[in-house]
Image (cartoon, rainbow, N blue to C red):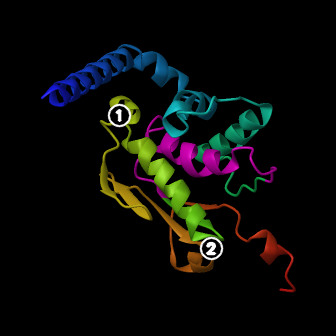
Amino acid sequence: MIAAIKEEKARRRAEREQMEVAARLTMDAERIRASCQSLTGFVREAWHVVEPSVDYVHGWHIDAICRHLEAVTSGDITRLLINVPPGTMKSLLCGVFWPAWEWGPKGKPQLRYLGASYSEHYATRDNRRMRDLVASEWYQTLWGDRVRLTRTGEIAFANGCLGSRQGVPFSRLTGGRGDRVIIDDPHSVDGAESEA
């Protein structure tokens, strides 16, 4: 009986905390939306959703990559190649934050993304991270009026405006189509050193 009472108290406390977070988010929504007009601002604001246990550390390279991705969004750049060292957020910026930013703050939920990597694991990882960001309470509170997921698989998901994101291994890229094709690490280090 005591265990059931403790469990109920914990459930009520968690529910109360969740309501307080939602209330703070609603009160702060306009400031967050204004900050998210730039991709860099969106990354800063959304970081806690994607990486809740890791502190965000900003660097000039993030500004540079974000400005180039914004130029793709505006149509000023039609093809973009980004070469940066491992661990500098290229995958997160290009495959997770940027598509979610285009769907929400930029009001382009109809865009279709095809993400590919040499490894199905990485393609699925970035798909899942973007899906979880878009499905989060934070994102839905701010842009849920225009972006609601209708299909929520790990390899492919879609929203109610016919926008979608699909992850495929690079070897199966030829059959897919998208408004944006994001190729992240098309070959492994071993494959880069092969005769072919």
The one of 6 and 63 positioned closer to us in this rendering: 6
Identify which amino acid the numbered label 1 is placed on: Glu
The alpha-carbon separation of the residues under discs 1 and 2 comes to 32 Å
Observer-nearest of 106 and 39? 39
**Which residue appears farthest toward the bottom when viewing the image?**
195
- Tell me if residue 3 can be seen: yes
Q: Which residue is mark 1?
A: 137
At a point 12% along the width and 29% down the height, the residue shown is 1
Give the residues in magenta: 83-112
Point out residue 111 in the picture as x, y percentages from the top left corner.
46, 54
Image x and y of residue 51, in percent = 55, 37
Q: Quadrant of residue 117?
A: bottom right
Marker disc for residue 94: none
* 20, above or below 190, in the image: above
Three-letter amino acid code of the residue under disc 2: Phe
- The mark that comes first in sequence, 1 or 2, is 1
64 vs 112, left or right, is right
Can you say whether 168 is above or below 165 in the image? below
Query: Which label was assigned to residue 170?
Result: 2
Q: Is residue 86 magenta?
A: yes
Q: Is residue 43 left or right of residue 62?
A: left
